[in-house]
Image: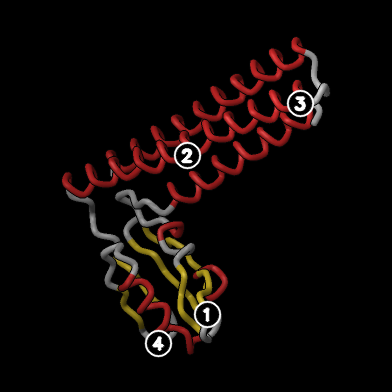
Amino acid sequence: MAADDILLDTEDRMDKAIQHLKQQLSGIRTGRANPGLVDTLKVEVYGSQTPMKSLAQVGAPEPQQILIRPYDPGTIKDIERAIINSGLGFAPASDGRVIRINVPPLTTETRKKLVARIKEVTEEAKVSIRNVRRDGNKAAEQGEKDGELTEDELKQAKEDIQELTKKYEGLAADMAKKREDEVMEG
């Protein structure tokens, strides 16, 4: 495998780790209502697990309220059940057409738990990025063994992979810091 291909593959996989982190962070609540808190929830409907955003329009018309407008009113009970069972601690209220969720202000204790969760998912992303680095380095070493890369190309590939690792770990840290600030300011 050529050095460029190894780098492209490495960067692509690191980018996927960052996208996964972004999705996980959006599901961690702050003191404000945010559609991301519920739009990735899976709802048991029609015999399968379906993402909330496929079943309903989710919005936050007010800072402390999430509004869910199901495309099919027959799914309201299923959506309410998914919210209650999600462990987010929300009590959905339905009028038969829409579901309203009042997002209570966060306590200091809850904020600390959320920040700990942010650190946890960020560390998982960093570990994932480092695993990708390891795989990229192995691929480069294998390329040298197979005669596809010279010793200098191997050295350069490893340096480039390390640069990518620093870049993506930095992105993860920045995303986590931003989310922690949002949780703490509430």
Tag 4 secondary structure: loop
Separation of residues labelled 4 and 3 (CA atoms): 62 Å
Q: Earlier in the sequence, mark 4 or mark 2?
A: 4
Give the quadrant of the N terminus: top right
The residue carrying mark 3 is 143
Instruction: Identify the residue position indicated by label 1 in the image.
Output: 48
For the point 51% across and 85% down, the residue is 47
| SS at mark 3 in the image | helix
Q: Circle 2 is placed at which residue position?
A: 125
Q: Does 46 sit left or right of 24 as displayed?
A: right
- Between the residue at mark 3 and the residue at mark 2, the CA separation in whole angstroms equals 27 Å
Q: Quadrant of residue 143?
A: top right
Residue depicted at x 39% and y 85%: 77
* Numbered label attached to residue 96: 4
Residue 115 place in picture, x, y as percent: 29, 41
The three-letter amino acid code for the residue at tag 3 is Gly
Return the residue found at the far bottom: 74
